[in-house]
């Protein structure tokens, strides 16, 4: 397959909720946690306090299931003033373990899109989160052989994309980032000088919300990954 966008040589892909489902498992576990603590506090308050704990702990635990699990434990202890029974703590830990072994469900159009792009562009998976968990999901997805490089980072900002696209490709100006997070995948990639394609997901953590850079000439939005190849054919 040929593309008109000959100036573009590399495409980076976010992983969670771009290549495979992720946030839905956090939401389901959060509901399980709220059910567990419902006799101790109002459901809305539990959700709010958990969200506060997650945001507060990002700088300590980073992104991922382990940090989320520790935040649930912390919230349970705080809301019950230390009276939470050990059986409930065990249930919270079990919920976290369930998330860590949950089967990987790739999103529609992912495999066929990557297969058609492989060989035409350098494909780079750029994701943040727990190293072991992200490596597990990539292996379970069966998509690993389609990527030329994999970068699991603690955060995503303009410097991240400048470094990765310079290391694995011809620099940001000749690269594109594809993802579902405006805050992590789109805005910083644009700031780095790359193309950025926003593919919204039905569920996105509130921490990842940001204003879309609609005025940026290198910004595009697509309803799903199946539209990426036609878009590439239109880029001059």
Image (tube, grey):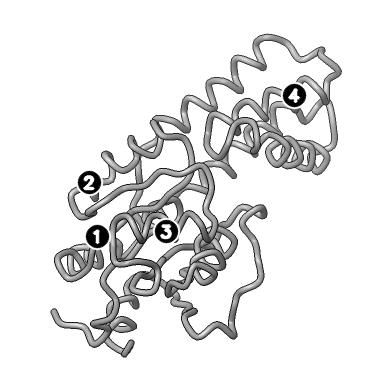
Q: Is residue 84 left or right of residue 145?
A: right
For the N terminus, the image quarter is: bottom left
- State the image coordinates of residue 222 (x, y, percent, origin top left): 44, 77
Earlier-in-chain disc, 2 versus 1: 1
Q: For the residue carrying disc 4, how many other residues have a C-alpha within 10 Å: few (<14), some (14-19), or many (20+)?
A: many
Q: Residue at 40%, 68% (x, y): give it.
A: 172
Determine the CA span between mark 3 and mark 4.
31 Å
The disc, 3 or 4, on the residue closer to the chain's N-terminal end is 3
Asked if residue 157 is positioned above or below residue 55 in the image, the reply reads below
Residue where numbered disc 2 is placed = 142
Q: Are marks 2 and 1 in contact (CB under 8 Å)?
A: yes
Residues packed near mark 3 inside 10 Å, few (<14), some (14 to 19) or many (20 plus): many
Q: Is tag 3's residue or tag 2's residue first in the polypeptide sequence?
A: 3
Picture disc at residue 67: none
Q: Nearer the viewer, residue 93 or 151?
A: 151
User: Count the marks: how many?
Assistant: 4
Disc 2 or 4, which lies upstream in sequence? 4
Q: Which mark is residue 18?
A: 3
Residue carrying label 4: 76
Residue to which mark 1 is pinned: 111
Quote the CA–CA distance across marks 3 and 2. 15 Å
Contact check, label 2 and label 4, Cβ < 8 Å: no
The correct choice, above or below, for 70 with respect to 211 in the image is above
Task: Measuring from the top left, give residue 35's x and y in whole percent.
Answer: 70, 32
């Amino acid at each position: 397959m040929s593309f008109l966008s000959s100036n573009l040589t590399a495409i980076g892909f976010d992983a969670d909720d771009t290549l495979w489902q992720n946030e839905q498992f956090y939401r389901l576990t959060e509901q399980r946690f709220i059910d567990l603590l419902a006799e101790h506090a109002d459901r809305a308050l539990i959700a709010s306090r958990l969200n506060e704990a997650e945001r507060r702990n990002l700088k300590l635990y980073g992104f991922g299931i382990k940090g989320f699990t520790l935040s649930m434990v912390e919230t349970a202890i705080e809301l019950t003033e230390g009276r939470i029974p050990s059986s409930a703590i065990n249930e919270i830990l079990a919920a976290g373990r369930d998330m860590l072994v949950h089967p990987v469900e790739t999103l529609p159009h992912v495999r066929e899109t990557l297969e058609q792009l492989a060989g035409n562009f350098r494909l780079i998976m750029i994701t943040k989160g727990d190293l072991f968990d992200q490596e597990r999901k990539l292996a379970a997805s069966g998509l690993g052989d389609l990527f030329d490089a994999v970068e699991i980072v603690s955060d995503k900002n303009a410097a991240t994309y400048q470094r990765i696209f310079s290391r694995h490709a011809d620099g940001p100006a000749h690269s594109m980032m594809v993802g579902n997070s405006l805050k992590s995948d789109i805005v910083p990639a644009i700031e780095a000088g790359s193309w950025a394609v926003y593919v919204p997901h039905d569920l996105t953590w509130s921490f990842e919300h940001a204003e879309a850079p609609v005025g940026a000439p290198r910004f595009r939005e697509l309803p799903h990954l199946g539209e990426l190849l036609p878009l590439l054919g239109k880029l001059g």
